[in-house]
């Protein structure tokens, strides 16, 4: 079969509340996020494995709280004194040393303004590599809520959403076939869907069970 030209089209990730599927793995985190007005000390750490939906949930929270989501790598460019909204810091567990001082001042500014701060990372702040003692003590004091590894219901929903983000229509039978055969992680689901997207584009065909089987074996 002749292989078709492929184009690296942008993936349109849906980050609205209606696109966030709730299961036992993330229901508690969603409840804590929604109760942002009652966070102790006005801050919360949202943690969980790669691809668990932390960024998606942060955007849901930002919409509800009237805040913004900021990547940790952009903290140094902030004019902290101009911040007047709640903030979520995505990737807060991988700060550069320069960004630590910026986050310290941002934390203090938000606390003084009584604006909530959501910290997003893969593990609890107590395990983050923070060199600045004053910042570490403040982050360690944050309450922690966790998104757990996915159950079948959540993993199926994640696969459907990842396919939809790439504008791929995949039969529920293919999803059902994949579920018991794939690694139980969000990160693997992302890798798998990306690989299936490439295969479908290259071959000019839908994602069928034979295609899924071949791609899964290669991964």
Image (cartoon, rainbow, N blue to C red):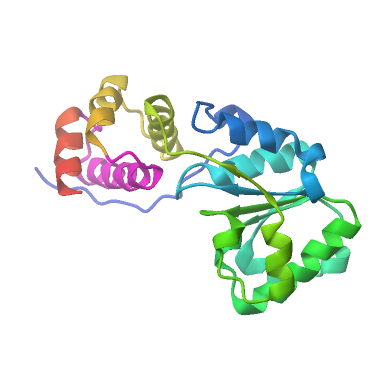
In the image, what residue occupies the spot 45% across and 46% down?
51
- Left or right of 27: which side holds 38? right
Please provide the residue range marked out in magenta: 183-208
Quarter of the image where one finds residue 108: bottom right
- Left or right of 69: which side holds 190? left
Who is closer to the viewer here, 85 or 201?
85
Who is closer to the viewer here, 20 or 12?
20
In the image, what residue occupies the spot 35% across and 28% down?
169
Q: Residue furthest top?
A: 173
Quarter of the image where one finds residue 97: bottom right
Q: Which residue lies furthest to the left in this view?
A: 1
Tell me the quarter of the image containing the N terminus: top left
Instruction: Please check the rendered image and state whether residue 199 is part of the magenta-colored stretch, yes or no.
Output: yes
Quarter of the image where one finds residue 141: bottom right
Q: Residue furthest right?
A: 113
Residue 207 lies, in percent from the top left, at 25, 33
- Left or right of 55: which side holds 184? left
In the image, what residue occupies the spot 71% across and 65% down?
137
Q: Quick check: can you spot residue 128?
A: yes
From the viewer's perspective, is residue 216 above or below residue 175?
A: below
Q: Quick check: can you spot residue 83?
A: no
């Amino acid at each position: 079969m002749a292989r078709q030209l492929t184009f690296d089209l942008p993936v349109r990730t849906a980050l609205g509340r209606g696109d966030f599927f709730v299961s036992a793995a993330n229901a508690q985190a969603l409840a804590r996020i929604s109760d942002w007005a009652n966070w102790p000390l006005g801050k919360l750490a949202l943690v969980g494995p790669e691809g668990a939906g932390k960024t998606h949930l942060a955007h849901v929270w930002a919409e509800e709280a009237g805040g913004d989501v900021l990547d940790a790598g952009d903290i140094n460019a902030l004019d902290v004194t101009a911040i007047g909204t709640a903030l979520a810091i995505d990737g807060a567990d991988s700060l550069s040393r320069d960004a630590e001082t910026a986050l310290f001042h941002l934390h203090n500014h938000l606390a003084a303004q009584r604006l909530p701060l959501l910290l997003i990372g893969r593990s609890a702040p107590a395990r983050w590599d923070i060199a600045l003692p004053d910042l570490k003590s403040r982050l360690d004091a944050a309450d922690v809520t966790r998104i757990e590894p996915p159950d079948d219901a959540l993993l199926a929903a994640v696969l459907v959403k990842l396919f939809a983000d790439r504008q791929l229509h995949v039969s529920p039978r293919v999803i059902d076939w994949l579920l018991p055969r794939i690694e139980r992680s969000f990160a693997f689901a992302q890798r798998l869907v990306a690989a299936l997207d490439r295969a479908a584009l290259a071959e000019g065909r839908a994602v069928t069970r034979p295609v899924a089987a071949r791609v899964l074996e290669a991964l």
